[in-house]
C-alpha cells in the first residue's frame, strides 16, 4: 500500500540510487580511491538487492555489469595487486562488498562469470593475506583521528591501518558468503584464522569501528549457519554483547567507534538489525526479535532521508542528551545510502515470511499483498507501530495461518477471533473467503535505564521531547503526541516523510534524569 512506511522508504531509496553518484562512469572514476572496491561494490550490492526486492532491474545494473571488467585489475578485483608485505586493510574491506555483490548476483541469476570472479578474488586477494595475518596488531592505541569516509592512518608490521579501526575484519562477511558458493579447505582455514585473530582483540579498548565489528559478526553468523562451528556462534555472541553494552545509542543506533560517540552510521545500523535478526533465527529468543523491531522503528526508519539516502545523526547518550541530524552528512551517499538498500530488503524479509502454511508477520506494517501463490490475500491497515490499532483483512482458502508478533502489554482481538497466544506471537486461521480482524495494542510509557540515565519508551517506540525552532513542525508531523509530567512527547519519526528543512531543524530530548520512585 502506498501509505506504507516501508513502501515509501523502498521507493525513495530506489529513486536515490538512480542519481549520478551511482552511474557506472562515476563508479569507474572512484574505483581506486582510498577504499578500492568499496563504492562500486556497495553500489552493485544495492542494485542487486533492489532487483530482488522490486522484481525490476534498477536503472544502472546492466551497464554497471558491462563496465565491471574494465574496473578490475588483471587478477579480477579492485585496486593494486596485493603486496603481502604491505597489506592495505581498506582494500580488503572494500573488496568484501564487491565479493558480497558477486555472491548475491550469483544466487539471483546463477551467472557463471560471477562464480569465476568470486573464485579469482578469493584466490588472488584474500588467500595470500594469510601469510601476513599473524602480524596484524592485536593491540593498538585508540585513535581520535578519522572522518566519516575513513583513511589510512599508519603503517605497522606490514599493514596499512585505517582510521576505521579493525576494518580488515569486514572481510569475514565477504568470505563467508564466498564459502557458501565456492567452499574450500583453504578458504575455511583463512576464515578461521581471521576469526581467531578477532577473538584475541579487545575491540572496546582498541576503539574498533562498530560497523567493522558488526559486519564481522554477521560474517561469523553466516559461517556458523554453513558449518555449525560453535566457536563462531560464541564469538559472535561475545561481540554482540559488547556492542549492546557500549556501542549502541539510546535510540538503538550506533556509536561510530567504541568509546567515541561522535555520529551514527546507518551502515552499522543495518548491520545491527541483521545481527539481531540472525540471532533470533538461531535462538528463537524473543528478546532478539524485540531488539530487531526497535532498531527498525527507531534507528533505521529515522536514518533515511526524504531523498531516499541514509545519513548520520547525533549519538543520543548521557553526554549528548538530544537527537539531531548531522548536517555535514545529511545523506552519506558514498556508503550508507547504498547499504540502505540491503537494510530495506532485510526489513521486508523480516516483516513477512512464509513457512509451510503459516505466514509469520514480525512487523504488521500496512500492506496489500498476496502470499502462498495467491492462496492468501492480505491487507493490513493502520499506522503500526504508532497508532494503537490495525485492521487485518484476508481472502483465504481457509488453510493458512497467520502468526503475528505483537510485543505489547495489552493486545485485544475482535471478539469472534480465537487467536492463540504463544509468548508475544498471536496465531489464528482465517476462515475461507473474506474475513476482517481488528487488533488493538497498547503499552505503558516506561523508563529504560541507559548509561545511568532514563529513556522513555512506549512499546517499540522511543519517545522524545521536541526542542528548538523546529518544535511546532515536529509536533504537527508526529503520528501521535503523548504527555508525561507536563512534557509533550513524540516517537522518532520516519524522516523520509519530512522535508529537508524540517529534518535539519529536528531536535529531540532523549536522555533525562531517572524519576524518583513514587
Image (cartoon, grey):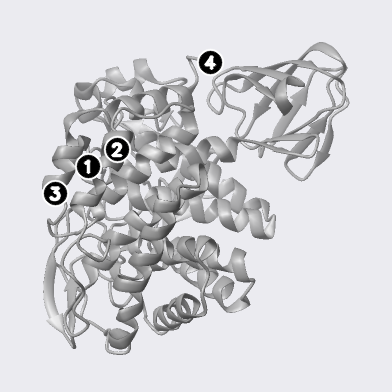
Q: Which residue is mark 4?
A: 1
> In terms of sequence position, does the residue under pointer 1 or pointer 3 come before the other?
3
Q: Secondary structure at mark 1?
A: loop
Q: Residue at x 16, y 81 (%)?
A: 86
Q: Which residue is mark 2?
A: 310
Point out which mark residue 422 bears. none
> In terms of sequence position, does the residue under pointer 3 or pointer 2 come before the other?
3
User: Residue 499 appears at what percent x and percent y?
Assistant: 25, 20
Q: Residues within 10 Å of mark 4 (few under 14, many from 20)?
A: some
In the picture, the quarter occupied by the C terminus is top right
Q: Is residue 299 visible?
A: no
In which quadrant of the rendered view does residue 510 lie?
A: top left
Q: Are marks 1 and 2 in contact (CB under 8 Å)?
A: yes
Q: Which residue is mark 1?
A: 332
Q: Distance from label 3 to label 2 (Cα)?
A: 20 Å
Above or below, comparing residue 130 to residue 110 in the picture: below
Q: Residues within 10 Å of mark 2 (few under 14, many from 20)?
A: many
Q: Are marks 4 and 1 in contact (CB under 8 Å)?
A: no
Q: Residue at x 15, y 46 (%)?
A: 28
Amino acid at each position: 500500500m502506498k501509505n506504507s512506511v516501508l513502501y515509501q522508504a523502498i521507493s525513495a531509496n530506489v529513486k536515490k540510487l538512480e542519481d549520478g553518484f551511482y552511474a557506472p562512469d562515476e563508479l569507474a572514476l572512484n574505483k581506486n580511491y582510498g577504499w578500492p572496491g568499496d563504492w562500486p561494490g556497495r553500489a552493485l550490492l544495492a542494485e542487486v538487492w533492489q532487483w530482488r526486492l522490486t522484481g525490476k532491474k534498477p536503472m544502472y545494473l546492466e551497464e554497471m555489469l558491462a563496465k565491471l571488467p574494465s574496473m578490475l585489475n588483471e587478477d579480477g578485483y579492485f585496486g593494486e595487486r596485493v603486496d603481502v608485505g604491505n597489506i592495505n586493510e581498506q582494500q580488503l574491506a572494500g573488496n568484501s562488498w564487491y565479493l558480497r555483490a558477486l555472491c548475491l548476483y550469483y544466487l539471483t541469476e546463477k551467472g557463471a562469470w560471477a562464480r569465476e570472479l568470486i573464485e579469482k578474488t578469493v584466490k588472488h586477494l584474500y588467500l595470500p593475506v594469510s601469510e601476513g595475518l599473524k602480524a596484524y596488531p592485536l593491540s593498538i592505541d585508540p585513535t581520535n583521528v578519522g572522518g566519516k569516509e575513513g583513511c589510512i592512518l599508519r603503517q605497522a608490521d606490514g599493514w596499512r591501518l585505517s582510521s576505521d579501526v579493525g576494518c580488515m575484519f569486514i572481510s569475514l562477511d565477504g568470505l563467508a558468503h564466498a564459502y557458501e558458493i565456492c567452499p574450500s579447505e583453504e578458504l575455511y582455514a583463512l576464515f578461521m584464522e581471521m576469526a581467531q585473530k578477532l577473538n584475541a582483540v579487545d575491540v572496546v579498548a582498541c576503539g574498533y569501528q562498530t560497523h567493522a565489528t558488526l559486519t564481522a559478526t554477521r560474517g561469523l553468523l553466516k559461517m556458523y549457519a554453513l558449518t555449525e562451528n560453535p566457536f563462531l556462534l560464541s564469538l559472535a555472541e561475545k561481540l554482540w554483547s559488547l556492542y549492546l553494552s557500549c556501542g549502541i545509542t539510546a535510540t538503538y543506533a550506533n556509536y561510530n567507534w567504541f568509546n567515541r560517540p561522535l555520529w551514527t552510521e546507518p551502515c552499522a545500523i543495518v548491520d545491527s538489525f541483521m545481527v539481531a535478526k540472525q540471532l533470533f533465527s538461531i535462538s528463537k529468543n524473543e528478546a532478539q526479535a524485540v531488539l530487531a523491531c526497535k532498531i527498525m522503528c527507531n534507528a533505521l526508519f529515522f536514518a533515511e532521508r526524504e531523498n531516499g539516502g541514509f545519513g548520520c545523526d547525533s549519538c543520543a547518550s548521557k553526554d549528548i542528551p538530544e537527537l539531531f541530524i548531522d548536517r555535514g552528512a545529511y545523506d552519506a551517499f558514498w556508503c550508507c545510502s547504498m547499504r540502505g538498500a540491503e537494510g530495506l530488503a532485510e526489513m521486508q524479509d523480516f516483516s513477512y515470511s512464509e513457512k509451510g502454511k503459516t505466514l509469520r508477520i514480525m512487523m504488521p506494517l500496512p500492506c496489500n499483498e498476496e502470499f502462498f501463490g495467491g492462496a492468501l490475500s492480505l491487507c493490513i491497515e493502520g499506522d503500526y507501530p504508532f497508532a494503537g490499532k490495525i485492521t487485518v483483512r484476508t481472502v483465504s482458502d481457509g488453510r493458512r495461518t497467520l502468526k503475528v508478533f505483537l510485543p505489547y502489554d495489552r493486545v485485544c482481538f475482535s471478539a469472534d477471533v480465537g487467536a492463540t497466544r504463544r509468548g508475544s506471537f498471536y496465531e489464528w486461521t482465517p476462515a475461507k473467503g473474506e474475513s476482517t480482524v481488528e487488533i488493538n495494542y497498547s503499552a505503558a510509557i516506561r523508563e529504560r535505564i541507559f548509561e545511568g540515565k532514563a529513556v522513555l519508551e512506549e512499546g517499540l517506540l522511543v519517545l522524545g521531547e521536541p526542542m528548538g525552532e523546529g518544535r511546532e513542525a515536529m509536533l504537527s508531523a508526529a503520528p501521535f503526541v503523548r504527555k508525561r509530567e507536563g512534557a509533550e512527547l513524540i516517537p522518532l519519526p520516519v524522516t523520509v516523510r519530512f522535508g529537508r528543512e524540517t529534518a535539519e531543524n529536528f531536535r529531540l530530548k532523549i536522555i533525562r534524569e531517572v524519576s524518583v520512585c513514587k
